[in-house]
Every structure is written in structure tokens, then in C-alpha cells.
Amino acid sequence: MNSPPLNDLTDRARNIFRLVVEGYLETGSPVGSKALSGEKRLGLSPASIRSVLADLEQRGLLAAPHTSAGRMPTDSGLRLFVDAMMQVAEPSREEREAIEQRLSSPGPIERALEETSAMLSDLSGAAGMVMVPRREPLLEQVSLTALGNNRVLAILVAQDGQIENRVLDLPPDAFGFSLEQASNYLTARAAGRTMADASRLISEEIATDRSALDEASRNLVARGLAVWSRDAAERPVLIVRGQANLLDEAALSDIDRVRSLLDDLESKQSVASLLENAREAEALRIFIGSENRLFSLSGSSVIAAPYRDREGNVVGVLGVIGPTRLNYARVVPMVDFTARSLGKLIS
């Protein structure tokens, strides 16, 4: 979605555009020429203001939801405002201290992540989101047990005591003695390694016939690794707090949009995939409405920033999601500061 360059607008058009956007973000309602004519800073007649509004609408920056209902920014208009006109208000010292204090409460890092999501919701008046760091545990043991109906229960025990059970659907020839042989082989290769590292080692051995497995066991291991690796890659952990904030008076007047947004949040995998874009960019990202296919129906905005460990590696993403009328100037620096503060806690 491309917005016209800011320098394509006259000073008069910029001022009126700014007032419309700021008024909309503050109230959630379209801004009319009558309200703008009361702005002494403009010094324009209602007729002149209407002419400028019509021009801004023709350029795709403003839209009129109803006849004589005033104008509101389009997604393109919001993008232009956010990228070229918004004056960011940095968090005050008191706000920074409050954020750091809430994040530094004693307890496991999971509690800090929960607190981060809730705090982002409080700060933004929208929903807060935090992607949990991907920390693959070191494995200690792998055992396989037949369940019947061509299914196998795989039990993965990590060195830190975590236990994961996964059910695999396998062909009949993968059963019998091959289960015990495969279990012993997997444990020998996986002990002290992450699943990703063990998968690479085992796949290489199988590919080069260095696995010392019979054909049935080799088939079992190969199928199991494919399932486990895909399963781990497709299970990002996303903490969402503050969905109730999305149900304000303005939202209730557009209940279909809100229902669509809540459905999007229920599909955490889709939202997590969107947040991965911020991880890959390694910088704060703002997604506005229909710019992203996921929120084309709900008309929502996402402000997301990666957070890093003490070595500077990106380990997760946090942010807020809400209607496009978010207070970007306040929320953007809050999200950025929270990401930096959380990063100080990640070892």
C-alpha cells in the first residue's frame, strides 16, 4: 500500500490532514469540516476546508464513512501519518521506572512474560502480546511404545526434567523389535543435544547409511524426526492479554469487525506468523489494517518489536493489537522501551 509523498501536499493540506488524523485517533469518530473551521490555527472558511478535505479524499488519504459524517483516515492515510508526520512522545521517567519495576518482580521468566503482555495491554488500552523465546531443551532420553492401530507414543525427556509425549502414525512394518532398537539409537544420538541438533545428526547418518539400523527402524526414525521437527516449528507460544479492552463503545458499534479480530487472536499460529516479520526485520514494525492479509477484515493494527537476550540475539517479539485508531505516538515508544527492558532480563 503506497501513500503519496508528504511533499506532494501543500502546507494547508498537511495541517488539515494532521488535524483530521489526530482527531480521529483521539475520539474514534470521523472529523467534520464544521469542527475544523473552529480551529483558529487554520484561518480558513468552511468552504475552503471542504475543498481540501475533498482533495485529500481523492488522493486516498481520507474517507467519508457516511454522507456528511466527516472524514477519517484510510489505512494509506494512517501509514503516511505514522511514517512522516507523527511526533513520538517518549515515555516519562516515571513511566520507564514503572515498566522496569513491573518486569523485574521476582520469579521465573515466564512470569515476566505474562506481566509484559498484561502491562502492554494496560499501557495501550488494546490487547498485549508476547512471543515466548524459543528455547529448545537438551534431551536426555527418547523412548517409543506401541499404542496399537499403527500408532506409536514417543516420550521425550529433557535434561531439565521436561517431558513431552507425541503420538506418531506409522506403517505396520515399523513395529516389533525395531521400536526398542530405534529407542536406543535415538537416545544415544539425542542425549545432550537439542532436537534440532539431534535431527541433523541422525538425518545425516541415515542418509549416508551410517546409522546401524535395520530398514524398519530406519523408517521409524526418519518418519518420527520429520513429525517432531515440523511439530516444534509450528508451535510458537504466544501470550495474549487484554482482549476485553477491544470491546469498548466504539468497537461495539462495529461488532462484526471485533468478532473477526477476536477470531484472529484465537488463531495464535496466524498472529505468531505475523509477529515473525518483526523478528526477521530486527526492528519495531507497524502493521496497519489491510496492509496485512490477516487483518484485512478486522481492520486492526499491530505494533510489534523484537526483544533480545544479553548477547543481542533476537529471542522473541512483543507488541499490541487493536483498532487502527491506536494512539501510535504514545504506544510505539512504550512498546520499544518495554522490548529493551524485557531484553535485560533474558539471559
Image: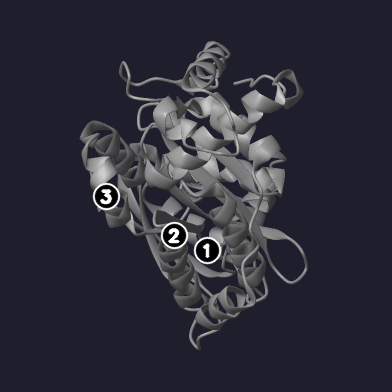
Residue drawn at 58 percent across, 61 percent down: 334
**Percent of width and height locating residue 78:** 55, 33
Amino acid under disc 3: Asp
Q: Quadrant of the C terminus?
A: bottom right
3 is higher (above) or lower (below) than 162: above
Circle 3 or circle 1, nearest the eye: 3
Callout 1: SS: helix
Residue 162 visible, this angle: no
Label 1 belongs to which residue?
Answer: 184
Residues tagged 2 and 1 counted as in contact (Cβ below 8 A): yes
Distance from disc 2 to disc 3, alpha carbons, whole Å, reads 58 Å
Residue drawn at 46 percent across, 40 percent down: 23
Amino acid under disc 1: Asn
**Percent of width and height locating residue 157:** 47, 70
Distance from disc 3 to disc 1, alpha carbons, whole Å, reads 57 Å
Label 2 belongs to which residue?
Answer: 180
Q: Residues within 10 Å of mark 1 (few under 14, many from 20)?
A: some
Residue 173, by quadrant, is top left
Residues tagged 3 and 1 counted as in contact (Cβ below 8 A): no
Callout 2: SS: helix
Residue 128 visible, this angle: yes
Left or right, residue 126 beside residue 256: right
The foreground one among 252 and 137 is 252
**Percent of width and height locating residue 8:** 73, 18
Amino acid under disc 2: Glu
Label 3 belongs to which residue?
Answer: 248
Residue drawn at 48 percent across, 60 percent down: 183
Q: Earlier in the sequence, mark 3 or mark 1?
A: 1
The residue positioned farthest toward the bottom in the image shown: 106
Distance from disc 2 to disc 1, alpha carbons, whole Å, reads 6 Å
Left or right, residue 340 beside residue 63: right
Circle 2 or circle 3, nearest the eye: 3
